[in-house]
Amino acid sequence: MNKFIGYGLGLRTVHYQHVLEHRPDVDWFEVHSENFMVAGGKPKYNLHAIREHYPLVLHGVSMSIGSTDPLDFDYLKKLKTLVAEVQPEWISDHFCWTSVGKVNSHDLLPMPYNEEAIQHLVDRISQVQDFMGRQVLFENVSSYLTYKNSEMEEWEFISEIVKRSDCKILLDINNIYVSSRNHGYSPHEFMKHIDPSCVQQFHLAGHEDCGEYVIDTHDHDVPDPVWELYADALKHFGLVSTMIERDDNIPEFVELQAEMNHAKEIAKTVPPQAA
């Protein structure tokens, strides 16, 4: 059974002082791994101070698990050191590639959905999990294009990787919505083909709706369509550890906390048999 640790927020620099002074009613925090993969400094000091009072999960954006470059074991060694220091509930990254030829795109780029890519990811995920000594969660990314050599739907692609590699899924509800709008499929179709036993965490976030397409920006409040999709996700997956993700145009802490509490209220409406 997947571990349920409640409702959390992404920990951002502008909120460190508020969290340390007020110790708000939040079950856990998610932090970006790369911000703390250093020997010391003020951010690391604050991280350890907050860790004394809250569980943490580590969320990375630079593993580039789908790249054709060799796995970056220098990166993985730093991540493993951080894991040993803060003892997170789990660690996560993305089903994507971010770099090639040692050039970082600083974006989460989608994979072609075919057997060759599945085997490539399974091999690399297995190496990472063996090195880290634990399961790793991988997140579905937002996408704006498709590959001509894709042979299946994204949910089939992800499900097959999870089955073969024994990793877990960080299911981003906003990303499902964004990609479904951009590619013209049903977000409910996506969710119903994902095994609930494989989903360890949800992300909720906002986006920029441009009418004909949607951009995953993480700089808006969670909009109504994503809340509605979250409610449907709870019916299918049951209670899953859930957090609000905000990376730009960051509001006061209490505003994010209110969004987190709204997620908690929605979860109370889930039928008991689903929860």
Image (cartoon, rainbow, N blue to C red):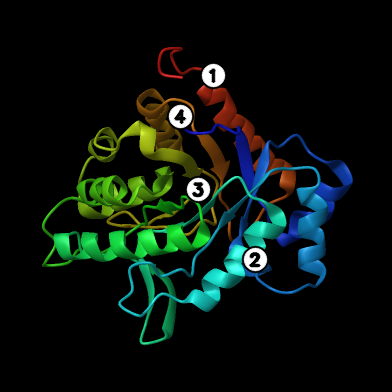
- Of circles 1 and 3, the one toward us is 1
Instruction: State whether residue 110 appears in this view.
Output: no
Residue 123 position by quadrant: bottom left
Judge the density around disc 3: few (<14), some (14-19), many (≥20) Cα neighbours within 10 Å: many
Residue type of the residue flagged with mark 1:
Lys
Q: Is mark 1 on a helix, strand or loop?
A: loop
Does residue 255 show up?
Answer: yes
How would you rate the neighbour count of disc 1 (Cα within 10 Å): few for under 14, some for 14-19, many for 20 or more? some
Real-space Cα distance between discs 1 and 2? 38 Å
Question: Which is more N-terminal, label 1 or label 4?
Answer: 4
Residue 86 placement: quadrant:
bottom right
Q: Mark 3 points at which residue?
A: 205
> Mark 2 and mark 1 in contact (Cβ < 8 Å)?
no
Q: Name the residue under label 1.
A: 268
* Three-letter residue code for mark 4: Met
Question: How far from the left and from the top, in percent, is residue 273?
Answer: 41, 13
> Mark 4 highlights which residue?
1
As helix, strand or loop, the secondary structure at mark 4 comes to loop
